[in-house]
């Protein structure tokens, strides 16, 4: 498994805008109406009450639209529930949903104190011995991400969902990350490191 260096990640982020998912301009008002069917799992205004379902509130519009498109394609990211939800969505629908959720405020989570120290160490400094790059390079000091490079907002996300996402990248179940960066990083993370980072991010703001 190749080692993803901090330099390669930063270089990729500079090039990303040229290759980022191109979605039409979204209409948040139209997206609000379309989001009604999403609320059962993702909660009112995108703050899900169930930790297995990700919070969508505050997420960058382009990132949300891309994930919906990837679910519809079904090759690089798949889920039986989401497949049914996105089957009838157009690109405009996806853009509208992205615009709506981007305008909502994400609710804050809370880190597990026992895991927070290790989680912060990895998030901010990585683990050079295991070939794990620092999360801060792409997702920023507060977990706000980088919309221009399509790096998602992580702050406040459910720890359980983040664990699943990292495990999916590590196991190759999810392959819609740019240049395989998340797959490379997650493949070098231990179970404890994944849980620690996920817990730390949940309380990050």
Image (cartoon, helix red, strand yellow):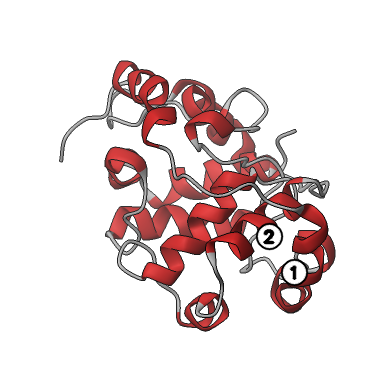
With 24 as the anchor, is 149 left or right in this view? left
Query: Which residue is drawn at the image coordinates 75% and 69% (left, top)?
Result: 35
Mark closest to the chain's N terminus, 1 or 2? 1
Which residue does the numbered mark 1 point to in the structure image?
A: 35
- What residue appears at the point 56 percent right and 55 percent down from the top-left corner? 65
Q: Is residue 125 placed above or below 92 in the rendered structure?
A: above
The residue located at (35%, 60%) in the rendering is: 174
Quarter of the rendering occupied by the C terminus:
top right
* Residue at the far left in the pictured view: 1
Of the pair 119 and 10, the residue shown nearer to us: 10
Q: Are marks 1 and 2 in contact (CB under 8 Å)?
A: yes
Quarter that holds the N terminus: top left
Determine crowd level at label 2: few under 14, some 14-19, many 20+ residues with C-alpha closer than 10 A.
Answer: many
The span from disc 1 to disc 2 (Cα, nearest Å) is 6 Å
- Does residue 118 appear to the left or right of 110 in the view shown? left
In the image, taking residue 133 as reference, residue 29 lies left or right, namely right
For residue 89, what is the image quadrant? bottom right
Crowding near pointer 1: few (<14 within 10 Å), some, many (20+)? many
Q: Position of residue 43 (x, y in %)?
A: 78, 69
Residue 145 is left or right of residue 205, and the answer is left
Q: Which mark is residue 54?
A: none
Q: The residue tagged with tag 1: helix, strand or loop?
A: helix
Mark 2 highlights which residue? 97
Element assignment for label 2: helix
Q: Position of residue 77 (x, y in %)?
A: 38, 64
Relative to 72, say whether 62 is above or below.
Answer: above
| Residue 71 x/y as whole percent | 45, 68
Which residue is painted at 60% across and 31% down in the image? 117
């Amino acid at each position: 498994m190749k080692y993803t260096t901090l330099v390669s990640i930063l270089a990729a982020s500079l090039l990303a805008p040229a290759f980022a998912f191109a979605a039409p301009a979204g209409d948040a008002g139209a997206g609000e109406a379309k989001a009604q069917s999403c609320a059962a799992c993702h909660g009112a205004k995108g703050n899900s009450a169930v930790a297995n379902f990700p919070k969508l509130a505050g997420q960058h519009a382009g990132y949300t639209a891309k994930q919906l498109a990837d679910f519809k394609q079904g090759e690089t990211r798949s889920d039986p529930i989401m497949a049914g939800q996105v089957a009838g969505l157009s690109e405009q629908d996806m853009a509208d949903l992205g615009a709506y959720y981007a305008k909502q405020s994400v609710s804050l989570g809370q880190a597990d104190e026992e895991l927070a120290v290790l989680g912060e160490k990895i998030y901010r400094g990585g683990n050079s011995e295991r070939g794990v790059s620092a999360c801060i390079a792409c997702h920023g000091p507060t977990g706000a991400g980088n919309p221009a490079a399509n790096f998602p907002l992580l702050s406040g996300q459910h720890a359980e969902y983040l664990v699943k996402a990292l495990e999916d990248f590590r196991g190759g179940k999810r392959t819609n990350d740019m240049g395989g960066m998340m797959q490379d990083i997650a493949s070098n993370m231990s179970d404890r490191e994944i849980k620690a980072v996920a817990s730390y991010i949940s309380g990050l703001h």
